[in-house]
Image (spheres, rainbow, N blue to C red):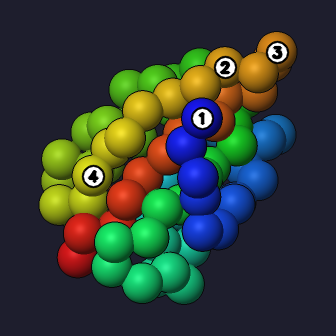
Amino acid sequence: MTVQDLTFDATGMVCPMPILKTAQKIKEIDVGQVLEILADDEGAREDFPAWCDQTGNEYIGVEEEGEVLKFYIRRKV
């Protein structure tokens, strides 16, 4: 289990909204802190690692909890 500093609920949103909102939410935490994103869009499995590669943030991983996917990203920039 990953410890997060902030949780953002993106359930019910479809691409590209989870990524656009994550780009805003990541700015609410300090460098080194972890953002947890809750999502139910299967496309997010590819979107979040790609977004991290593009932005320089660290993709920690994903956990499944029923229908909800929990993504963890460490702010690096």
Amino acid of disc 1:
Met
The answer to whether residue 75 shows anywhere in this view is yes
Q: Position of residue 68 (x, y in %)?
A: 76, 27
Write down the residue under mark 3: 66
Are discs 3 and 2 less than 8 Å apart at CB?
yes
Mark 1 or mark 2, which has the lower sequence index? 1
Amino acid of disc 4:
Glu
Q: Quadrant of residue 40?
A: top right
Mark 1 or mark 4, which has the lower sequence index? 1
Q: Residue at x 42, y 84 (%)?
A: 30
Write down the residue under mark 1: 1
Distance Cα–Cα, label 3 vs label 4:
25 Å
For this view, does 45 lie left or right of residue 77? right
Mark 3 or mark 4, which has the lower sequence index? 4
Q: Residue at x 69, y 60 (%)?
A: 7
Mark 2 or mark 4, which has the lower sequence index? 4
